[in-house]
């Protein structure tokens, strides 16, 4: 008869299936565990920088480099080109206003001056001749007017006499008519002569005005050419020191070419270069300071140059108070430029952590000092030494500010001494 075979509950296939499922579950659970903020890493505290959150004075400022420059600089350019004929001083010389620096020769300009002088002199002679001719013509017209006036007076006398005699029947109408016609004729001559004299006077004035205007224009041109020739001798426009002077005898200088500059020695300013992303926050009146000879000196922005060159723009800063003794043109100063007023804030020391976190979170050390865990923070402004902390931590908290480069996605640090 048939025998019933008992079926095994735990056969090999079933055991392998359950083991596989269990392994998958453990793998998933491990993955969830390590990605759910529970991953840990042992670190040596001697390799960490632990900083304490403190409350203190905070002022946002940036470190910038400034170059000491003369308060005023006058540039010397060749107003007209020419050949360097003579040098009177060398670079670095201290000059008084009007002192000669160099002399240029320009044959074309000097020839133009000679021609213009000849034209002006010729114009002067022509004006004298014209003036003599006009005077002669005017005298002739005045003489004619005098003759006409005498003839009119005589005709008027005869006319009045004959008119009276005619009224008394002493003379005939023919004689009276002749006297009357002569009177009217001389009256017309007098009016015409007066009109001609008046027109001549107006014409003479216009002619004289035009001649004077033409002569004045020629004289101005002559004066301008004389000044140009005079400017071939370059002189100091103001008291100061000659710098950047580059000229040698025999060298040709083009019109407008830079010859040098005069630095006024009455004071100094500091020209500062600033990164372009600060341009919207920089304005006149902002202050800064620098260390010189173990003393702190203050500066204030007086002028902002908004043109950006090579990622930077420039500002001119003036000294507040006395200028440091011993400071020299061209000297470089390390300036701390303040971007805000001083306030009281929570201070987070700067460190390498920022490169990995962007200031969004940080490792906070627990109260027992045995571990550190991530906390979200908010940073507002910054100075070269501190960040201004606005949320996430409180005064007295300790945080790790050294680099997080090797931590990856670690969520918690176990601190080992």
Image (tube, helix red, strand yellow):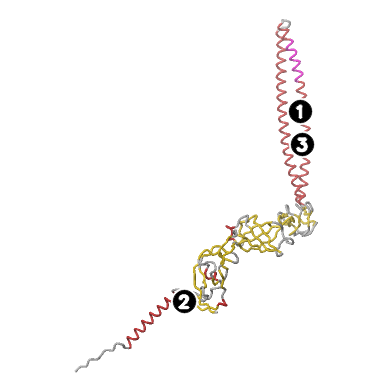
Q: Which residue is at 51% across, 79% downward?
A: 42
State how far apart marks 3 and 1 are (Cα).
Answer: 16 Å
240 relative to 392 in the view: left or right:
right
Q: Are marks 3 and 2 in contact (CB under 8 Å)?
A: no
Say which label, 3 or 2, has the lower sequence index.
Answer: 2
Q: Which residue is mark 3?
A: 127
Which callout, 3 or 2, points to the residue nearer the camera?
2
Secondary element under disc 2, as helix, strand or loop, is loop
Q: Dot 1 surroundings within 10 Å: few (below 14), some, or many (20 or more)? A: some
Q: Which residue is mark 2?
A: 39
The image quadrant where one finds the C terminus is: bottom right
Secondary element under disc 1, as helix, strand or loop, is helix
State how far apart marks 1 and 2 are (Cα).
Answer: 119 Å
Q: In the figure, 193 relative to 8: above or below?
A: above
Say which label, 1 or 2, has the lower sequence index.
Answer: 2
Q: Magenta segment range? A: 148-161
Q: Nearer the viewer, residue 75 or 342?
A: 342
Q: Which residue is mark 1?
A: 138
State how far apart marks 3 and 2 are (Cα).
Answer: 107 Å
């Amino acid at each position: 008869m048939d025998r019933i075979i008992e079926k095994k509950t735990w056969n090999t296939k079933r055991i392998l299936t359950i083991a596989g499922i269990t392994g998958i579950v453990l793998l998933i659970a491990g993955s969830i565990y390590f990605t759910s903020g529970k991953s840990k890493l042992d670190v040596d505290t001697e390799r960490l920088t632990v900083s304490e959150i403190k409350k203190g004075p905070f002022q946002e400022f940036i470190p910038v480099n400034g170059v000491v420059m003369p308060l005023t600089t006058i540039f010397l350019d060749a107003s007209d080109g020419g050949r360097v004929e003579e040098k009177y001083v060398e670079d670095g010389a201290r000059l008084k206003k009007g002192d000669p620096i160099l002399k240029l020769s320009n044959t074309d300009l000097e020839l133009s001056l000679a021609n213009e002088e000849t034209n002006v002199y010729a114009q002067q002679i022509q004006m004298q001749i014209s003036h003599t001719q006009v005077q002669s013509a005017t005298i002739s017209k005045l003489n004619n007017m005098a003759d006409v006036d005498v003839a009119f007076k005589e005709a008027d006398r005869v006319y009045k006499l004959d008119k009276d005699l005619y009224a008394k029947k002493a003379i005939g109408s023919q004689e009276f008519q002749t006297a009357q016609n002569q009177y009217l004729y001389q009256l017309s001559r007098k009016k015409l002569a007066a009109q001609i004299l008046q027109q001549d006077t107006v014409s003479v004035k216009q002619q004289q005005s035009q001649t004077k205007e033409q002569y004045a224009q020629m004289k101005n041109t002559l004066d301008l050419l004389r000044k140009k020739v005079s400017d071939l001798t370059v002189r100091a426009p103001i008291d100061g020191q000659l710098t950047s002077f580059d000229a040698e005898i025999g060298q040709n200088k083009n019109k407008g070419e830079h010859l040098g500059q005069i630095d006024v020695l009455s004071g100094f300013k500091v020209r500062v270069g600033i990164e372009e992303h600060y341009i919207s926050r920089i304005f006149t009146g902002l202050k800064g300071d620098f260390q010189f000879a173990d003393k702190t000196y203050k500066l204030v922005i007086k002028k902002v140059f908004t043109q950006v060159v090579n990622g930077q723009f420039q500002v001119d800063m003036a000294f507040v108070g006395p200028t440091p003794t011993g400071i020299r043109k061209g000297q470089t100063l390390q300036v701390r430029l303040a971007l805000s007023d001083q306030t009281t804030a929570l201070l987070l020391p700067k460190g390498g952590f920022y490169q990995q976190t962007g200031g969004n979170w940080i490792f906070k050390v627990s109260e027992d000092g045995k571990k550190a865990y991530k906390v979200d923070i908010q940073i507002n402004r910054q100075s070269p030494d501190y960040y201004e902390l606005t949320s996430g931590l409180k005064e007295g908290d300790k945080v790790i500010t050294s680099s997080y480069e090797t931590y990856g996605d670690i969520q918690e640090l176990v601190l080992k001494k």
